[in-house]
Amino acid sequence: MPKQDFVIERYDPVTERSYEQQFTAEYEPGQTVLDCLNSIKWTQDGTLSFRWSCRHAICGSCAMKVNGRSMLACKTQVTDIVDRGDPIRVAPMGNQKVVKDLVVDISNFLDAFERAETWLQELPDQDPPSREYRTDKEEFDRWSHTATCIHCGACYSDCTVVAADPKFLGPAALAKAYRFVFDSRDSKKHERLEFLSEKHGIWDCTRCFMCIEACPKDVLPMDAIMELRTEAMREGITNNHGSRHSNAFRGGVRKRGRLDEATLPILSAGVRLGAIPELIGYTPGALRLLKSRKLIMAAKRHGANREGRRQVRRIFDEVEAEKARSAVDAEAFAAERSSALMAH
Amino acid sequence: MKYAFWPGCVSRGAAPELYTATKAVAEHIGMELVELEAAACTGAGIISDGDPYLQDVLNARTLAMASKLGLPLIDICSTCIGVHSLAVEKLENEEYRARINERLAPEGLEYTGDTKPRHLLWALFEDLEGDRLRSLIKRPLAELKLGPFYGCYILRPERVLGFAEHPHRRRSLESAIELVGASVVTYDGMTKCCGFPILTTNKRNSLAMAGGHVGEAKDSGADALVTPCPLCHLNLDAQQYDAARVVRRKLDLPILHLPQLIGLAMGIEPDKLGLDGHVVNTKPLLRKAGVR
């Protein structure tokens, strides 16, 4: 049987010592990282701790970092990740406190679902139907992939925003919120979108695609967050930084065909009292930019050529009219979703 | 070698040194760049917050322009290449493409699916023979330890970026650093988000990301970072002193645009590469490299 070296990041809560330990495990083709961890635990070191249960990528217990990326140990075959005899590096999930070895405290991850109230809020004053509550196929197709989340936390572990802000709701809870926002049996769509548009919600996502790459179940969390943004704006929930930023950006491109860097921060902050400290906050940075000539270049207000601008304005007008007639944005998301699900 | 060239908004605005350096390098190696002057901003994933369809129309238009010229399309921005590549994927859906082509028809354009946008970083390695590329390096930067900073969209989602057909793209920036004779410094943050997309929506988080990555690279021994993304450059260079305040440490790490690095190693003079147009002073770095 082939042999493989593993370097495992360990932590002993009694001595509070973090250290790396190397093991060698035998494996047969088809065996997974989890199989090797179990073999190490059963035959070499019984104190090695990690979570696991189903071994079929359905319980979501065994997410951990393998060679720096979060994934399910039971879904990752050794032969797929061996690289020129290098050891496979195994570490606990990121963005959460380590309890012991590969076990992390997932309470912050789970709290996000509670904060976002990701359960069905039924319609008021309605007699229960004689059978189960039904939905139609078109609606089901829109969100069924998000309902396959197994709460493994791989997305949360790799989320670049959670790393900077532990209060960020995170990809999994936001994807679960999406599932209820687009479920017509739920009564709280607007309230949900209002809550999700607040700080630590949809507008704090950086669109880094980490969660989409990490998810072992193709939930496409970031795409769900993007669609929530569009839906929130469509519902008129626009008194927030993210919507103002998007609208200001769009306005600049409409006018000049290109990003208008000079006015964007001002328009994103908004015309309101609360914006004043924020705009003052830009001043030191702006002074440095001035020194490096960057602000002058930005203020020169480049743009597409005359014909380009004319065509861009035409397209903006036509798209606006088209949006009033049909659900083109939903079509855009459906196109992305189907190709993403097909490719994954 | 002739290309349709989309400079992106930022190289024509707040990062003019990227435009200057790109032109200088292209001229030096004989790449003819036909600039798409009528093309529009990609929307950068921000127009799509409220108007995903509109963003797709704008990008289909740019792709169709390159196709009309019969030239391969070159981007010089990670965000641009990512948004263009995602548009290509969505436009494989025939119904959706037909709808979008109705918006392009009045201008005499049609998106047919034959444009495969590429970043300059990829094209350098794919279109120039390895020997020719190496022979252009007249001033190896052997003294420098450089950290790559990719920018999300040139790495993710992998499925739209041609990584399966072109595996070299996974570590293209490391290859560029090796090409110029410098040593590669790796660090966790090199493939993560610079924070720029949320600079106006959540400045503290944004700068914590930028400051964290720059600090980590510095701790790993990097003399500078190199990036193929002008948006990352804005957060890592132009915002670096504000980011330093958020992470409460001194940073002072120069950030190079990809063509500046290549150009330097090809022997182009620093002032022709806009190296004096950064917020973080690049002179100590140039001295270390033995350029001045």
Image (tube, coloured by chain):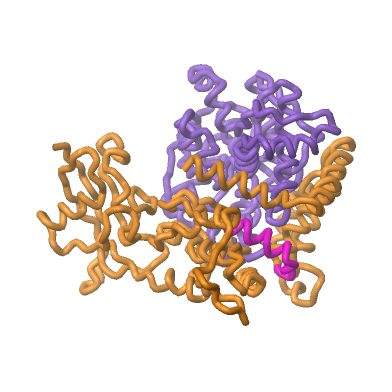
Chain colours: A orange, B purple
- The magenta span reads A223-240
For the point 51% across and 56% down, the residue is: A144
Q: Position of residue B47 (x, y in %)?
A: 72, 52
Q: Can you give x and y, in whole percent of width and height, for residue A231 in the image?
A: 68, 61
**Horizontal and vertical percent position of residue B118:** 60, 31
Q: Residue furthest left?
A: A43
Residue B99: say if magenta.
Answer: no
What residue do we see at 15% from left, 43% from top? Answer: A26
Residue farthest to the bottom, as pictured: A125
Q: Nearer the viewer, residue A184 or B239?
A: A184
Q: Is A226 one of the magenta-colored residues?
A: yes
Residue displayed at 48% across by 44% down: B147
At 48% from the left and 71% from the top, the residue drawn is A113
Horizontal relation, residue A40 to residue A284: left or right: left
Res A29 quadrant in image? top left
The reply to whether residue A116 is in sight is no
